Image (cartoon, rainbow, N blue to C red):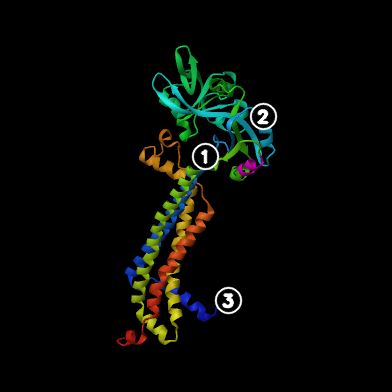
């Protein structure tokens, strides 16, 4: 449906005012500043949101490569865990399960003593539910199956203890050994058979030993603490855990990764929200720069407004002229900012490498930040959301100057012309 001449006229005049090279040069400068500010604000917001998505995705992928999607536990050690594993495997969406024993322990080297999260696993079955074998920096994860009292350490933990593959550490577990001389904590000398690094906090606290070794050290016999479960879709973990809780017999409880790691990812989402609000204020400032631009434009075009009103232009048409001028400025800024933001988000790693080559410094030291480059994941819904919010703010910014333009009295303006 085509617009009539009367409907097209405000848009046409608004475009003429926007792109005209004549008139007040200062108004043109302020208009250009508003446009550039809008472009920079939109580009910054899209880029930062993409980087935040990249960090969250990297953290999720790395942590959940070791953390089970679902854990099935019991208040008492599980004796017939093979039957439980078969029952869990019948649940739709379950790929595999593996037994484990988990607890706190102390690891001592000649340098110092560290508290660790000790996990006893079946090295063969574990590789079906965890990708820790793919993050080995030294040694072999399979060596746990060959050496009953071997241990695989996180890279930061091994570094703080000052040990490497082949060295020995003293493991102390919270279980007493009764001797004629009294009760003593149970300890065992272990050989470091591997070092893994995923680039997360687990590198500084996690230690793996064989399931058989853990059962002997903790006196569990053939029993285990629970099962680690791998799913086809990790985002279905809450629903799968709920189905397992409803279907399992006995004193079993299924917990998904969103409960064990939920606080971390909730904090990341909150940080992303706060960063969005802060950067949106930049867009808001750029949007409301349009107020000053249009206010000066109204003052500069008072005589034009008066002539249009005497020719029969309605107040609504005058408002539409200046609203279209403001929205055209904002639209160009939003479009340019979106293009720049998308380009930066898709090529942020190359930009980082370029800045590093210029400055001669490493912006992201892998030993400090766990990453060697800046991760970025562009989500198109973020682009649409940012552009939409910027457009709404720009529309609101045009209302007051356009309303003032519509209230210009032709008689007062033309009295001295």
Sequence-first disc among 1 and 3: 3
Q: Quadrant of residue 28?
A: bottom left
Which quarter of the figure is the C terminus placed in? bottom left
Front residue of 380 and 209: 209
Residue under the point 42% across and 42% down: 354
State the image coordinates of residue 285 (x, y, percent, origin top left): 37, 61
Sequence-first disc among 2 and 3: 3
Front residue of 163 and 329: 163
Q: Is residue 243 magenta?
A: yes
State the image coordinates of residue 338 (x, y, percent, origin top left): 47, 57
Front residue of 357 and 396: 396
Q: Which residues are magenta?
A: 241-247
In 3D space, how far apart are the residues under numbered discs 2 and 1 (Cα atoms)? Answer: 24 Å
Q: Which label was assigned to residue 260? A: 1
| Image position of 142 with respect to 243: above or below | above
Q: Which label was assigned to residue 252? A: none
Q: Badge 2, how many Cα within 10 Å: few under 14, some, many 20+?
A: some
State the image coordinates of residue 236 (x, y, percent, origin top left): 61, 45
Circle 3 sits in a helix, a strand or a loop, which is it?
A: loop
Tell me, yes or no, if residue 60 can be seen here. Answer: yes
Q: Is residue 375 magenta?
A: no
Q: Badge 1, how many Cα within 10 Å: few under 14, some, many 20+?
A: some
Q: Are marks 2 and 1 in contact (CB under 8 Å)?
A: no
Q: Are marks 2 and 3 in contact (CB under 8 Å)?
A: no
- Which residue is tagged 3? 2
Q: Which label was assigned to residue 82? A: 2
Sequence-first disc among 2 and 1: 2
């Amino acid at each position: 449906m085509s617009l009539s001449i009367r409907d097209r006229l405000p848009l046409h005049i608004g475009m003429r005012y926007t792109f005209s090279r004549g008139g007040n040069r200062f108004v043109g400068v302020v208009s250009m500043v508003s446009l550039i500010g809008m472009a920079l604000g939109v580009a910054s917001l899209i880029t930062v949101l993409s980087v935040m998505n990249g960090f969250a995705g990297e953290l999720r992928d790395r942590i959940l490569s070791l953390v089970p999607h679902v854990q099935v536990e019991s208040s008492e050690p599980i004796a017939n865990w093979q039957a439980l594993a078969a029952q869990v495997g019948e649940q739709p969406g379950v790929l595999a399960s593996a037994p484990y024993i988990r607890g706190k322990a102390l690891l001592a080297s000649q340098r110092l003593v560290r508290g660790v999260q000790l996990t006893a696993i079946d090295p063969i079955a574990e590789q079906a539910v965890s990708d820790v074998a793919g993050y080995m920096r030294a040694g072999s994860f399979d060596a746990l199956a060959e050496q009953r009292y071997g241990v695989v350490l996180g890279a930061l933990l091994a570094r703080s203890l000052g040990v490497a593959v082949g060295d020995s550490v003293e493991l102390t577990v919270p279980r007493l050994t009764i001797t004629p001389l009294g009760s003593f904590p149970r300890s065992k000398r272990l050989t470091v058979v591997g070092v893994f690094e995923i680039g997360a906090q687990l590198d500084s606290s996690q230690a793996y030993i064989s399931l058989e070794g853990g059962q002997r050290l903790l006196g569990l016999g053939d029993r285990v603490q629970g099962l680690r479960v791998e799913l086809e879709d990790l985002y279905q973990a809450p629903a799968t855990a709920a189905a397992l809780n409803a279907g399992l017999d006995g004193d079993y409880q299924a917990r998904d990764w969103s409960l064990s790691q939920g606080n971390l990812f909730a904090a990341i989402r909150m940080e992303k929200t706060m960063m969005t609000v802060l950067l949106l204020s930049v867009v808001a400032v750029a949007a409301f720069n349009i107020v000053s631009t249009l206010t000066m434009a109204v003052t500069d075009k008072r005589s034009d407004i008066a002539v249009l009103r005497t020719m029969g232009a309605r107040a609504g048409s005058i408002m539409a002229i200046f609203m279209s001028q403001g929205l055209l400025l904002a639209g160009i800024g939003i479009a340019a900012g979106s293009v720049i933001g998308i380009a930066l988000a898709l090529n942020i790693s190359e930009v980082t490498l370029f800045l590093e080559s210029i400055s001669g410094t490493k912006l992201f030291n892998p030993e400090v930040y766990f990453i060697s480059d800046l991760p970025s994941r562009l989500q198109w819904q973020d682009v649409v959301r940012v552009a939409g919010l910027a457009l709404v703010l720009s529309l609101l910014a045009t209302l007051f100057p356009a309303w003032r333009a519509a209230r210009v009295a032709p008689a007062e303006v033309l009295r001295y012309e």
